[in-house]
Image: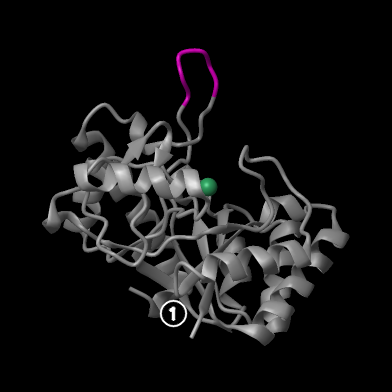
Amino acid sequence: MIELFVRCDDVTDDTPALAAVAGAMHDLAVPCAWACIPSRLTAAAVDRLAAVPGSSVHQHGWTHQRIGADGVDTEDELPGYPDRASQRTAIVRGRQAMLELVGRRAPHVLDLDTFTPPRHRYTRDTLAILHELGVKRLSAGVYHDLPSRLIYAVARPFGVVSLGGRGISAHDRPCTAGVPSLGPVEISVSVNVDLDRRGRPREVDVDALLAEIESAARRTSTVGLMLHHDTYAGRPDRADALRRLLDAAARRWSIVDLRTLG
Ligand SMILES: [Zn+2]
């Protein structure tokens, strides 16, 4: 039995794009895990999502930023902290902000058990910190193309968390980086609905995406779909395509709440 889950990333404020995607989830009764950037999350966004049945909100880093010496923001945040203590301080601040804002306004949607690292990049320190804080699920990305599978197979036995710029995924298994006591279980996404590999918006092609889900489902029984609500800004045609995709997917597979996995 193939199960899908849906994760929508980079929630900060209540924008028309957020409303468009939240409206699709509401109308189609699709449960969605919303990954929120705590340093910029607003009460209005929380209220918007809390009104959608099946929503859960979880922490997506603290600032989602890493400004390099050249002034460029690589947006991957966590590998940029110089040591474990400073990374821990940032993650704890994010957790605290989620507790204070979401815990106060809509505790029924707050999911402190799940963490999505910005740009799916993290370090061994991240795993140790999440373990200490009691986080049970790490949601990164697991891809099923041949190069990705080869890299995972080579790197996993050595307990590294990234190789050649790719995160090393271990879907459905403890994400231990070689140290068993470190692991939250990794429940990762494998279909990037609206961005290409370089992070540029791509067309929401319903037939192609259904084929991609089908192909991922041959390798894992739980397939995660990743959305970026910002890509729907001012694009009702994209939002329509997303509705058609979710509707078709819900007819073929079961779409479950991320909180029930792992
Ligand atoms: Zn993100």
Tell me the chief SS of the magenta region. loop
Instruction: Look at the numbered disc 1 and give the secondary structure of its residue.
Output: helix
**Which image quadrant for residue 254?**
bottom right
> Any magenta on residue 71?
yes
Q: Position of residue 212 (x, y in %)?
A: 64, 63
Q: Position of residue 67 (x, y in %)?
A: 48, 24
Mark 1 Cα-neighbour bin, 10 Å: few <14, some 14–19, many ≥20: some
Which residue is at the front of the view, 74 or 91? 74
> Any magenta on residue 70?
yes
What span is in magenta? Answer: 67-72
Q: Where is residue 161 in the image (x, y as percent from the top left)?
A: 30, 42
Q: Position of residue 202 (x, y in %)?
A: 74, 48
Quadrant of the image containing the C terminus: bottom left
**Where 234 sits versus 78, above or below?**
below
Please name the residue shown 53% across and 17% down the image: 71
Q: What residue type is labelled 1?
A: His
Please name the residue shown 53% across and 53% down the image: 41
**Residue 254 visible in the shown view:** yes
**Residue 61 visible in the shown view:** no
**Which image quadrant for residue 58?**
bottom left
Please name the residue shown 62% across and 80% down the image: 30
**Which image quadrant for residue 211?**
bottom right
For this view, does 122 lie left or right of residue 35? left
Q: Mark 1 points at which residue?
A: 108
For this view, does 97 lie left or right of residue 50? left
